[in-house]
Image (cartoon, grey):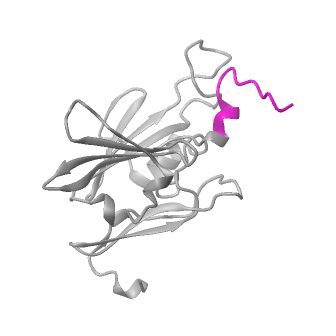
Amino acid sequence: MRLESITYALLFLMIPAIDMEANYSRDLAFLVSTPGDVRFSGQGKLNVWRGLVPLRSTRHDVERVLGDSKSSSPPDYVYDTKNENIIVRYSTDTCSRAPNVEWDVPINTVVSITVSPKADLLIRDLHLDLQEYGRSELAHPQGLIRYVSAEDGVQIESKLQDGCEVVMSITYTPTTKDNRMRCGFKNTEE
C-alpha cells in the first residue's frame, strides 16, 4: 500500500519508539485507507503502540503523544482520540519501597496500554497469525474471545457479532523477555 493511497485517516499511527531495544521485530499498526478497508502492517515489536513501549516509556512520553488524560483512577489514566479510547496503566512505586509492586521500574513508567477502537475492526483484518496466540472463549460474558501472546506482550479481546469477531481492545504489556524486570525475579540461568 502506497502512502499516497491513505485517504481516510491513520487509525493507529506508529512514531519512532522511545528507548527501544535493538531486537524488536514487529509493531501493530493499523492503517485505514477508506472507512471499510483496514490493513494490518507488521513491523517492529508487537507490544509497541504509537512508539510507546511498556516498561520503557514514561507518562511524559504518553502525554507528548496523546496529550493530557481525560480522567484517571490511579494507576489507570484514560486518554481519548478521534479513533480510539486508551487506558494507560503506570507504575506507582518501586520494588524497594512497596511490597505489592509487580515491576522494578521508576514511578510513572508505562506498565500497559489498552486501546479500544471506536469503529468496528474485525480480527481477520489484523492479518495476524492467530496460531501464535493462545485463544480462549470466556463463559461470561458469552461470545467474548481472548487472544494472548505473552511472548510478544499482546492481548486482543473480541466479541462475536453477526458471525464475525469484532475487536473490543488490544492491550500491550511487557513481554516474556521483560520478566527480568519483575520484582523478586530470580534469574536461574546465572
109 to 52, vertically: above or below: above
- Which residue reaches farthest right? 190
Q: Is residue 173 left or right of residue 5?
A: right
**Residue at the spot 22% in from the left edge and 30% down from the top edge:** 140
Judge by depth and name the residue closer to the eye, 76 or 144.
144
- Which residue reaches farthest front? 131
- State yes or no: residue 71 in magenta: no
Across and down, in percent, residue 141 comes to 20, 33
Displayed quadrant of residue 123: bottom left
Across and down, in percent, residue 42 comes to 50, 67
**Residue at the spot 69% in from the left edge and 20% down from the top edge:** 184
Across and down, in percent, residue 165 comes to 25, 54
Judge by depth and name the residue closer to the eye, 68 or 83.
83
Q: Would you say residue 29 is visible in this rendering?
A: yes
- Which residue reaches farthest left? 162
Across and down, in percent, residue 72 comes to 33, 31
Q: Is residue 20 left or right of residue 145?
A: right
Displayed quadrant of residue 71: top left
**Residue at the spot 52% in from the left edge and 61% down from the top edge:** 27
Numbered range of the magenta stretch: 178-190
Q: Quadrant of the C terminus?
A: top right
Per the picture, the main secondary structure of the magenta-coloured stretch is: loop
187 to 112, vertically: above or below: above
